[in-house]
Amino acid sequence: VDNLIYDNVSGYSFWHIAARDLKVKSFASHDDIKSGATVLALNWDGWVWPASITAIIDTTSELPESSDSCREELVLDSKPSENFKNSFLFSLSGELVGLIGNEGKIQPIFNFTSAINSLLKNKTIARAKLGVNYINLAIAVSGAVADSKGALISKDKSGTAILKNSAAEKAGLQEGDIILTVNGVEIGADNDL
């Protein structure tokens, strides 16, 4: 291990290992991780544990939510044993799907992709951060209003809608604005901010 960096957003540490030929084919994208998929957990002792993904859940319980947090978790058909805490989850095709934390919670790898790419390129963690608290209208109104789309910028419990010195503040976004698309992708039930 020649470098260790702690990520404040996810609570994980990233290790840079001076090694070659590590057998990770690629990182699974959001679209690649689906309920019903068979996965294999692999721990540091070389043990393998097969499981199936039963759901991808959003752990946000309060509205509004932050645009800059890691909210999704994977749920498997059974809980990992102690032997598989702090281990890796792979698809049958060899893609890295997720990380099993020391509490047994499974973070999908797409929560870390931008941090990993930044580490590989810049040797530091940098993520794109919008800096808003918002309510996903498609989820909040859940069919009460036809075709509800977008992210309504709204204050959180502390009274903050736009973080100071954030990209959102620099762009002139304000509380009450509704973000409809980001890079041509519509914000809705299937695409959260």
Image (cartoon, rainbow, N blue to C red):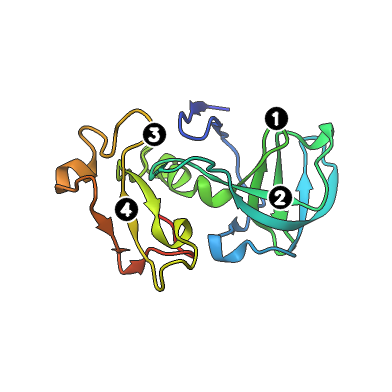
* Residue behind mark 3: 124
Separation of marks 4 and 3 at Cα, in angstroms:
32 Å
- First reached walking from the N terminus: tag 3 or tag 1: 1
Question: What's the mark number on residue 75?
Answer: 2
Q: Quadrant of residue 11?
A: top right
Binning the other alpha carbons within 10 Å of mark 2 as few (below 14), some (14 to 19) or many (20 upward) gives some
Q: Are marks 3 and 1 in contact (CB under 8 Å)?
A: no
* Residue behind mark 4: 152
Question: Who's the residue at 49% across and 49% down the image?
Answer: 113
Residue type, mark 2 in image: Val
* Residue behind mark 1: 102
Question: Who's the residue at 60% across and 65% down the image?
Answer: 32
Quarter of the figure with the N terminus: top right
Element at badge 3? loop
Question: Who's the residue at 55% across and 66% down the image?
Answer: 31
Q: Quadrant of residue 127?
A: top left
Q: Which residue is at the front of the view, 99 or 4?
A: 99
Mark 1 vs mark 2: in front:
2
Left or right placement of residue 18 versus residue 133 in this view:
right
Residue type, mark 4 in image: Leu
Quarter of the figure with the C terminus: bottom left
Mark 3 vs mark 1: in front:
1
